[in-house]
Image (spheres, rainbow, N blue to C red):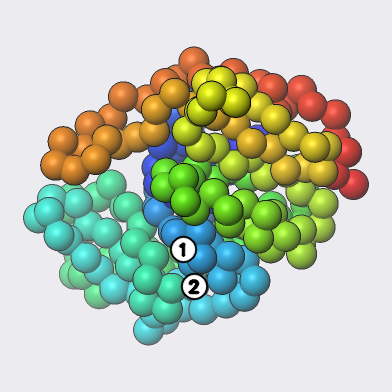
């Protein structure tokens, strides 16, 4: 019931750790808040359309697909493509469009909790703008995750009952370059998600 909107793949890795593999358009990508709000306000117009996608392989191992309209890069977890790259790209673009349409349906249904992790605390000010962009589709729940502080303990959640939740973690992943290590606080993620899930639905 939780669908990642970014900012990176941490929630996706949490879900994988617990053997949950939901299909989500933005589960394996990292849109900045401004890009995500633009995507939502435009109803993902043009995302994945022919002519708007290209292949990237910066590390020489995994293929990535980049949407050139919004500048968003998607993991494929594929290191060897069968057939030529044009055919591979066409299949990836078709998959992106299918996930785009699924995302639009999920947004309209209002059954899922959408999650955005603000790795940069300065960007957390975008949480209200992001919530407003989601509300254009109907009543919704948004969980904004950021670093714990003196007023908000790790693993805690606060909300005003509007459908907007703030969750807090003791650390965010990955660490800064060049180490870029992952040390995900799985128990804190579970605590946050459980608290949100058990909140009465007041967003409607």
The furthest residue to the bottom: 51
Which residue of the protein is positioned furthest toward the left in this rendering? 60
Identify the image quadrant of residue 111: top right
| Left or right for 47, reference 199 | left
Query: Along the horizontal axis of the image, is 154 left or right of 202?
Result: left
- Residue named by callout 2: 47
Secondary-structure class at tag 1: helix
Asked whether the beta carbons under mark 1 and mark 2 sit within 8 Å of each other, the answer is yes
* Residues packed near mark 1 inside 10 Å, few (<14), some (14 to 19) or many (20 plus): many
Mark 1 sits on what residue? 96
Q: Closer to the camera, 131 or 102?
A: 131
10 Å crowding of disc 2: few (<14), some (14-19), many (20+):
many
Of callouts 1 and 2, the N-terminal one: 2
Q: In terms of depth relative to the viewer, which is nearer, 46 or 153? A: 153
54 left or right of 20 in image: left
Q: Tag 2's secondary structure? A: loop
- Where residue 170 appears, as percent x and y from the top left, is 44, 23
Residue shown at the point (47%, 33%) measured from the top left: 147
Query: Which image quarter holds the N terminus?
Result: top right
How many badges with numbers are in the image?
Answer: 2
Mark 1 or 2, closer to the camera: 2
The image shows residue 31, relative to residue 199, as above or below, that is below
Looking at the image, residue 50 lies above or below residue 121: below
Residue drawn 27% across and 59% down?
A: 64
* Residue 83 location (% of width, % of height): 20, 65
Identity of the residue drawn at 32% across and 52% down: 75
Above or below for 80 versus 16: below
Q: What is the quadrant of residue 198 in the picture?
A: top right
Q: CA distance from mark 1 to mark 2?
A: 8 Å
């Amino acid at each position: 019931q939780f669908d990642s909107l970014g900012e990176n793949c941490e929630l996706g890795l949490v879900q994988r750790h617990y053997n949950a593999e939901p299909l989500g358009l933005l589960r394996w990508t990292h849109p900045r808040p401004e890009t995500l709000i633009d995507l939502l306000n435009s109803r993902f117009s043009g995302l994945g359309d022919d002519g708007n996608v290209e292949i990237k392989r910066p590390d020489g191992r995994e293929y990535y697909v980049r949407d050139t309209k919004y500048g968003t890069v998607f993991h494929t977890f594929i290191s060897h493509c069968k057939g030529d790259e044009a055919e591979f790209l066409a299949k990836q673009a078709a998959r992106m469009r299918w996930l785009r349409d699924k995302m639009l349906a999920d947004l309209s249904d209002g059954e899922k909790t959408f999650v955005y992790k603000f790795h940069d605390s300065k960007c957390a000010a975008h949480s209200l703008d992001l919530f407003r962009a989601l509300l254009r589709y109907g009543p919704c729940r948004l969980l904004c995750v950021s670093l714990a502080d003196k007023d908000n303990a790790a693993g805690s959640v606060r909300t005003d009952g509007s459908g907007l939740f703030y969750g807090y973690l003791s650390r965010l992943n990955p660490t800064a370059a060049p180490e870029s290590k992952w040390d995900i606080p799985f128990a804190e993620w579970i605590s946050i998600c459980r608290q949100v899930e058990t909140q009465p639905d007041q967003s409607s």
